[in-house]
Image (tube, rainbow, N blue to C red):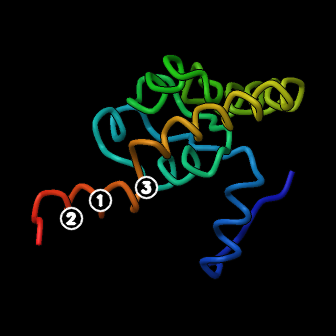
Amino acid sequence: MRIVDGALDYDVYYRTIGSSVVLLPYKPEAYRWRDSGVYHEAKLLDAPVLATAGTWIADEIRSLVNGLVIEDFSVDAVVETIARAQRELSALTSAAARVGREARKTEGVTRCIEALAGAFPP
């Protein structure tokens, strides 16, 4: 496990996200409906995500199976979920890559630009 402290250059940030399991122990009440750019980047970069139950991210993870849900907002639950992710890393990575491939077909900057260009033909 590696914990990154401080800001990263964009290239390093994207390489790090894309080669990691991303831990998002968000407070459920704060992220029930609030968006997370880190989650979207992780999904589009094929990274498995660990997120707290009660967030919309956890709901999506349960649906898409691109990570694990931290069942309680506690240190013990986070540690338990990290340990599980280590045991299941191969399957999690494969599932996240599948979800990322599908997501890139409809999401991301390229898809947004295409949608805008289509809305304003020359």
Tell which tag, 1 or 3, sits nearer the viewer: 1
Tell which tag, 3 or 2, sits nearer the viewer: 2
Q: Residues within 10 Å of mark 2 (few under 14, many from 20)?
A: few
Placement of 23 over or under 115, stated as above or below: above
**What is the spatial separation of the Cα atoms under label 1 and label 2, in whole angstroms?**
5 Å
Q: Which residue is identified by label 1?
A: 114
Q: Earlier in the sequence, mark 1 or mark 3?
A: 3
Placement of 87 over or under 9, stated as above or below: above
**What is the spatial separation of the Cα atoms under label 1 and label 3, in whole angstroms?**
20 Å
Do tag 1 and tag 2 residues touch (Cβ < 8 Å)? yes
Q: What label does residue 72 carry, if any?
A: none
**Kind of element beneath mark 1:** helix
Q: Amino acid at mark 1?
A: Glu
For the residue pair 10 and 100, the one nearer the viewer reads as 100
The structure residue drawn at horizontal position 56% and vertical position 34%, both measured from the top left corner, is 51
Q: What label does residue 117 carry, if any?
A: 2
Do tag 3 and tag 2 residues touch (Cβ < 8 Å)? no
For the residue pair 33 and 64, the one nearer the viewer reads as 64
Q: Residues within 10 Å of mark 3 (few under 14, many from 20)?
A: few
**Kind of element beneath mark 3:** helix
